[in-house]
C-alpha cells in the first residue's frame, strides 16, 4: 500500500516535470477543456492499447453519485457528487485522488462540471444552486439560485446541468426564464450585469434551459454566446445580452444535450430522441442576423444523444444514435457520412468522446474504453479495455492532463497513465 502511494506521487511528479519541459498545458479548467471543444492539447501519448489498457496510477473512492466530470488547475481537481441526498462540490489532490474539501451547495445528483478561474471555482446544483467557492479551501464566496433569483426553469425534470462559462470579468450562465434565459454576472460578486429576454422561439421543444453549455462565437464579426436550450439553438450579444438569432428545428421535447460546435460563421448542432443534426451559417445583414440552414441530417443519418462531438480539421467525430455510441465521422461542410454510424464499436451504449494527440477516446456507457484514430480515411480501432470500476452508467467525459487520463465513475475516480513509453 505504501509503495502504491509512493508510486502514484512519483508518476504525477514525473508527468508534471515532463509537461513543464515540453510546454504542455497543465490545466483543464472547464467543461470539455480549455476551449470547450473536447480537445486536449497533449502530445506524446500512446498510439495503441492492448486488452489490459494503460497502467492504472491510482484509484480513489468516496465522491458520491453524479455525472459531473472534472476540472483541474495547479494540482487541484474539482468535481461534484451527491452524498446522503446533499450535493457537494469537491476539491481533490491531483497527485493521489485524496479529498481536500467538500462544500454543500444543494441537493440531488449533480450533472455540472465545475469551472475554475484562478482562485475561484464555480459549480451548479441540479436545482439551480449556483455557487462560487475558493478553490484552495472550498469556502463559499457567493451564491445565487436560478429559480429564486431569475425565475428560471428546465425543459424537463433531470435538473440543471450546464458548466458556467467564465469570460473576462463575467460569469455567463443559463437560468432558463423568458426574461433571463441567459445571464451575465460579476464573477467575483455574483451581481447581475445583464439578462437576456427571449422572443417567440418556435413550436418545437419545451420552454426553459436544457442540458448543454454555452460556447463563444464571433459570427458576423460580433462576439456572441451560443447555447442549446429547450427551444433549440439561441445566440445573444456578449456585450449586453441582446437576442440575436435562434434555430428551432433542432429541438426535441425531452432533452437537448450536446454542446454546439462553432467555427467561423458556422454552428453545428445535434440532439437525440429521434431528431438529427444541422449545420447553420450565421449571416449579418445590417443590424440583424439571419440563420441559413446549410443542411439537416435526419436521425438515421446522425443524432448525438449525449457524449458530445469533436471537430478535428474538416471532420466531426462522435457517437451516433439514441442511447448508442456508434462511431461516426462526417464532413462538416457537406454533412456527408465519411465512415461509421452502423458498427457497434468497442463498447455499448452512449459514448463520451475526447480527442488528444490524433486519437479519439471513446468512453462507453458500459464501462469500456476505445481508442480510435481521428482520420477520415476509415474507422481504425487502436485498442480497447475495461475500466477498473463500474458503478453505474459511464457518462462523465474523460479528461487528459499531462499525459494522465482521469475518469469519474460516480463514487470513484480513476487515473491512468496514457503517455507513450
Image (spheres, grey):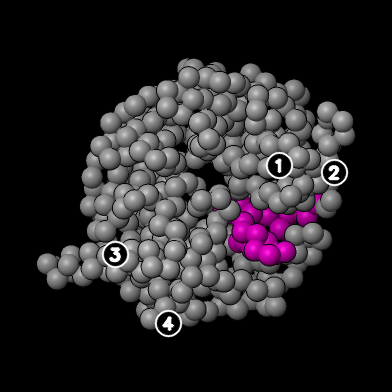
SS category of the residue bearing label 4: loop
| Residue 12, disc | 3
Q: Please tell me the numbered disc located at residue 121.
A: none
Q: How many labels, in total?
A: 4
Which residue is located at x 68 percent, y 55 percent? Answer: 303
Dot 2: element: strand
Task: Find the distance from the CA under tag 2 to the CA under tag 4.
Answer: 46 Å
Question: Is residue 47 left or right of 178 when viewed as pictured?
Answer: left
For the residues labelled 3 and 1, the Cα–Cα distance comes to: 38 Å
Establish if 304 lies above or below 171: below
1 vs 4, front mark: 1
Q: Secondary structure at mark 3?
A: helix
State the residue position of label 4. 50
User: Which stretch did the figure color magenta?
Assistant: 296-322
List the residue tagged with mark 1.
Answer: 218
| In the image, residue 195 lies in the stretch drawn in magenta | no
Work out whether residue 378 can be spotted.
yes
Picture quadrant where residue 208 is located: top right
Q: Is residue 113 left or right of residue 230?
A: left
- Circle 2 or circle 4, nearest the eye: 2
Residue 188 image position (x, y, % from top left): 42, 27
Amino acid at each position: 500500500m505504501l509503495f502504491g502511494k509512493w508510486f502514484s506521487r512519483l508518476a504525477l511528479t514525473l508527468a508534471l516535470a515532463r509537461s513543464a519541459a515540453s510546454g504542455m498545458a497543465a490545466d483543464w479548467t472547464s467543461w470539455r477543456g480549455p476551449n470547450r471543444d473536447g480537445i486536449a492539447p497533449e502530445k506524446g501519448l500512446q498510439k495503441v492499447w492492448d486488452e489490459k489498457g494503460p497502467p492504472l496510477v491510482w484509484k480513489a473512492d468516496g465522491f458520491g453519485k453524479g455525472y459531473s466530470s472534472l476540472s483541474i488547475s495547479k494540482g487541484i481537481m474539482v468535481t461534484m457528487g451527491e452524498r446522503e441526498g446533499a450535493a457537494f462540490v469537491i476539491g481533490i489532490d491531483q497527485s493521489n485522488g485524496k479529498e481536500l474539501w467538500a462544500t454543500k451547495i444543494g441537493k440531488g445528483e449533480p450533472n455540472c462540471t465545475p469551472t475554475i478561474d484562478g482562485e475561484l471555482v464555480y459549480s451548479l446544483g441540479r436545482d439551480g444552486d449556483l455557487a462560487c467557492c475558493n478553490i484552495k479551501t472550498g469556502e463559499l464566496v457567493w451564491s445565487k439560485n436560478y429559480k429564486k433569483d431569475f425565475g428560471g426553469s428546465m425543459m424537463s425534470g433531470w435538473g440543471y446541468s450546464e458548466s458556467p462559462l467564465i469570460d473576462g470579468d463575467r460569469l455567463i450562465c443559463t437560468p432558463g426564464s423568458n426574461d433571463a434565459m441567459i445571464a451575465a454576472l460579476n464573477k467575483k460578486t455574483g451581481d447581475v450585469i445583464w439578462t437576456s429576454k427571449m422572443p417567440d422561439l418556435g413550436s418545437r421543444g419545451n420552454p426553459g434551459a436544457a442540458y448543454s453549455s454555452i460556447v463563444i462565437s464571433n459570427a458576423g464579426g460580433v462576439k456572441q454566446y451560443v447555447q442549446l436550450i429547450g427551444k433549440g439553438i439561441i445566440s445573444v450579444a456578449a456585450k449586453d445580452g441582446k437576442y440575436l438569432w435562434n434555430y428551432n428545428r433542432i429541438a426535441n421535447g425531452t432533452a437537448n444535450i450536446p454542446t454546439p460546435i462553432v467555427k467561423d460563421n458556422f454552428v453545428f448542432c445535434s440532439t437525440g430522441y429521434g431528431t438529427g443534426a444541422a449545420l447553420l451559417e450565421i449571416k449579418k445583414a445590417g443590424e440583424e442576423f439571419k440563420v441559413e440552414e446549410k443542411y439537416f441530417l435526419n436521425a438515421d443519418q446522425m443524432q448525438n444523444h449525449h457524449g458530445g462531438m469533436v471537430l478535428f480539421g474538416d471532420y466531426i467525430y462522435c457517437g451516433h444514435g439514441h442511447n448508442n455510441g456508434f462511431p461516426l465521422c462526417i464532413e462538416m461542410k457537406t454533412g456527408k457520412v465519411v465512415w461509421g454510424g452502423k458498427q457497434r464499436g468497442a463498447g455499448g451504449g452512449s459514448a463520451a468522446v475526447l480527442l488528444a494527440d490524433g486519437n479519439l477516446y471513446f468512453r462507453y456507457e458500459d464501462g469500456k474504453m476505445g481508442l480510435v484514430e481521428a482520420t477520415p480515411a476509415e474507422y481504425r480501432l487502436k485498442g480497447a479495455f475495461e475500466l477498473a470500476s463500474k458503478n453505474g452508467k459511464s457518462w462523465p467525459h474523460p479528461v487528459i492532463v499531462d499525459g494522465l487520463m482521469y475518469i469519474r465513475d460516480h463514487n470513484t475516480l480513476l487515473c491512468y497513465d496514457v503517455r507513450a513509453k
